[in-house]
Amino acid sequence: MLKIKDLQVSINGKTILRGLNLEVNKGEVHAIMGPNGTGKSTLANVIAGKPGYHIDKGEIIYKGKNILEMPPEVRAQEGIFLGFQYPVEIPGVSMTNFMRTAINEHRKYKGLDPMSAGEFLKLMKEKQKLVEIQAKLTNRSVNEGFSGGEKKKNEIFQMAMLEPNLAILDETDSGLDIDALKIVANGVNKLRTKENATIVITHYQRLLDYIVPDFVHVLFDGKIVKSGGKELALVLEEKGYEWIKDESSK
Amino acid sequence: METKYNDILFKEKLVSLFNEHRRKIGFNDTGQMSALRDNAFETFEKTGFPHTKIEDWRNTNLKNVFAHNYNVLFEAQADKPDIEKIFQCNIHNFDTHIIALYNGWYLSEDKHLITLPNGTIIGSLAQAVKEYPELVEKHYNKYADINENGLIALNTAFAQDGIFIYVPDGVETYKTIQIVNILDRDDKLFIQNKNLIIVGKNAKLTFLHCDDSYNYNRSFTNTVTEVFIDEGAVVDHYKLQNLNDSSALINTTYFHLEKESKLTSNAITLNGGLIRNKSNVILAGKKGKANIYGLYLVDKEQHIDNRVFVDHAESDCDSDELFKGIADDNATAVFNGHILVRKDSQKTNASQTNRNIQLTDKATVFSKPFLEIYADDVKCSHGATVGQLDEEALFYIKSRGIGEYDAKLLLLYAFAAKVINKISVEALRENIDDLVKKRLRGELAICDMCVLQCKTQEKTYEFEIDLSKI
């Protein structure tokens, strides 16, 4: 589904990713871990198409297409979803309006007619229930005045609405208490199918107790320096990142 | 040979027109009004037109406005437009009393002044001078200041007609009074109206003032409106401006608030070549409250200048200002807010906010908040911003599959909605909401008819339902 080859990315002349390789197939959950400032969020942003990054080398092949030239909205319509580390507040745009516009843009891209108001409301209720989000959230402006936990739940709700093929969750666990973490993880697990894939970016092992990955990768200094199964996360939890640093500097 | 500037030439022309038509201009005047007129004329002769060397006019240059040869009508035009057509200018689901000025003169089928069953009098100011001279004299030019600038003096010297509204004490007008200014001529007109609105003690009035162009001809309008709001009265004032790109409109409104009265004013500018809205608000009694709001959407070479002066002349009063605007292309937007809190005006609560989005490098925004406070027990705040669309928010919206154009539209609409949501008359709010959406999509043109008719012509505009319309 996703193949990243020798990706080198810089921002304002500073190189962040230095030849990153990653392959994700459908049905898989990948966890990307690593210390702060090693390029985890850059990787997520570049896959989603955030402007401001310079691709110095390499390619990102998604469903057989190089997506680097695609605008972010087309990547989204192609099924890529980014769960933001810091979801943006958009005062004045209601969640309902926002999601409805997004859903219908996705439908238009697939050549489908817009969803009727009734169908849409039904879908919204259904997905809210799935991710255990309160109804009052949807009547408010996008993320405006939401608590940290509400914002993250809202990301998962949007993911449930848009049903992506590839979801990238950037530090979804940051700032969450254990109850909110469980709700968020539950939502992600319920949305897992054999057809879609998830990349979970996290700093701590904690989230991986609830979202169990098939693969764990360690990102350090702009490269994936170690890959393994879910056990690798436990090793990292126990030993920290220092031994990886030592190992990779050898 | 000496070259004369356009403003000098235009001034000379007006001076000779005044002398030539002096009797005709003042045919209707009371003695007091006639004296005011001559005094104002002298003032105009002395001061001339405002220019950019005057601080208050630094950002609004009228030079190009004066470069044209305007006609002045000293009497109402004999031919009348199709009144039925004008009266179709109603707002969907919104029952109003419509009164209209046609090329600067009151337009009616028969009576120039009518008394509604509840005692409210609406109609032509010229007619009100005839029928209720004492009432008019009590307020006429009591709030306007001919020394504010040459255009106020000029208006006072020349104005012959305008709108008159009188709401007696204790009367609540439930039906909104809609004033429609219609300009429809083949030549270039210079129009100077004077409107007088008197709202009695504990009375209530909602009025909507629409300035619309009906064609693409150039025009120059210089209007002065005086609004007297007596003790405990409540006034809702809406201004809707949709003029063509060749029009110039100078609009000066004086609001005088007695104790415990409340004013809400909301000016929505959708289109116009050069518009200057000046609101002078005097809180002349204790516990008065004034909310002054505005939204302006300018593009191409358009110029909008909003100025608000709030005088907290008494203690325990509140004032709240919110002006938001979007400047696109080469347009210019100006905001000047001046709050004056006098020495003894303790317990004043005043806030002023101006937010601007500058969509291009060539658009210009001037914003000047100004607080002048002489009392010590007050709560005053101000804020002014000029910025671009939030890039983080744009990416967030796009990352959900919404394209650049729609994402921008969503953000621009959300920006404007804060002001639209302040409109308390629901039918009007919905309608203006539609107009703003159309304007942002670039679909709002100068209609053959009043712009408010848009809704009846076609389907409603909703972001939520019809995506292709976003």
Image: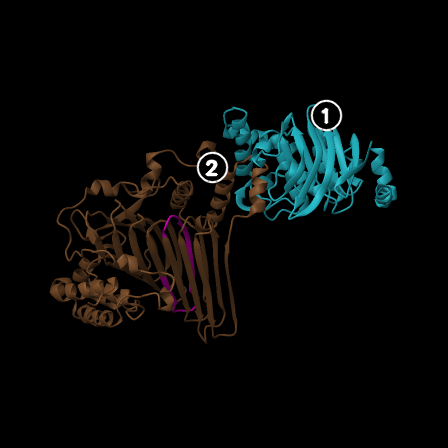
Chain colours: A cyan, B brown
Residue at the image point whose x is 72% and y is 25% from the top: A27
- Figure quadrant of the N terminus of chain A: top right
Q: Chain of mark 1?
A: A
**Is A95 left or right of B55, judged from the image as shown?**
right
Residue type, label 1: Gly
| Left or right: residue B187 compared with residue A82 | left
Magenta region, residue range:
B279-302
Residue assigned mark 2:
B463
Q: Identify residue type, mark 2.
A: Phe
Question: Around disc 2, counting alpha carbons within 10 Å, would you say few (fewer than 14), some (14 to 19), or many (20 or more)?
Answer: many
Tell me whether marks 2 and 1 sit on the same chain: no
At 50% from the left edge and 30% from the top edge, which residue is drawn?
A: A117
**Total count of labels:** 2
* Residue A199 position in % (x across, y down): 72, 34
Coordinates of residue B363 in the picture (x, y in percent): 43, 52
Q: Disc number at residue A27? A: 1
Label 2 residue SS: loop
User: Which quadrant of the figure has residue B277?
Assistant: bottom left
Residue B453 as seen in the image, left or right of residue A46: left
- Where in the figure is residue B296, as x and y percent of width and height? 40, 51
Q: Residues within 10 Å of mark 1 (few under 14, many from 20)?
A: some
Is B276 on the left-hand or right-hand side of B113? right
Q: Main secondary structure of the magenta part?
A: strand
B284 in the magenta segment: yes
Q: CA distance from mark 2 to mark 1?
A: 36 Å
